[in-house]
Amino acid sequence: MYRMITYRGFEIHVELSQSAEDLYDVTFQIRDGHNLPVVGERGGRIPLHNGPYTRRWAYLIAEVAGQAAIDVLLGATATDSDRT
């Protein structure tokens, strides 16, 4: 199963592979976007640990992990007052 999420000019590509009935291992990859030179050679697939996960959790966790990785690459824009 596959899903692509856009975030801050990047694409987070999430891929699930079934490991048991209704459970999935998940990997994500950050690519494309106008900020591609920032990612460079680091744009490989990243497996998420502590799985397997249900399909819904796998997509959610991969999306959040991808967004966090992009925030680290570009620098977070939220100020402390924005986080509540």
Image: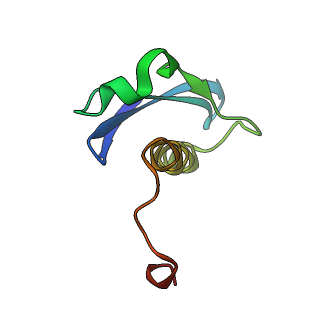
Question: Farthest residue in the top direction?
Answer: 41
Residue at 51% across / 51% down in the picture? 64
Is 75 on the left or on the right of 5, as rendered? right
- At 72% from the left and 38% from the top, the residue drawn is 51
Q: Is residue 82 above or below residue 10?
A: below
How many marks overall?
0
Q: Where is residue 15 shown, x and y percent of the image?
A: 47, 27
- Residue 28 horizontal/vertical position (percent): 50, 30
Compared with residue 29, is residue 6 higher up or lower down, i.e. above or below? below
Q: How is the image coloured?
A: rainbow
- Provide residue 65's location: percent of width, then percent of height: 55, 45
In terms of image quadrants, where is residue 31? top left
- Residue 12, picture quadrant: top left
Residue pictured at 53% horizontal, 21% vertical: 45
Q: Quadrant of the N terminus?
A: top left
Relative side of 31 to 69, left or right: left
Is 81 located above or below residue 49 in the figure? below
In the foreground, 52 or 67: 67
Q: Residue most toward the right?
A: 50
Say which of 4 and 2 sits in front: 4
Q: What residue sits 47% from the left and 85% below the top?
A: 81
Residue 37 shown left or right of residue 42 in the figure? left
The residue lying toward the viewer, choosing from 19 and 30, is: 30
User: Which residue occupies the extreme left position in the image?
Assistant: 34
Counting from the top left corner in percent of width and height, residue 11 is at 32, 35
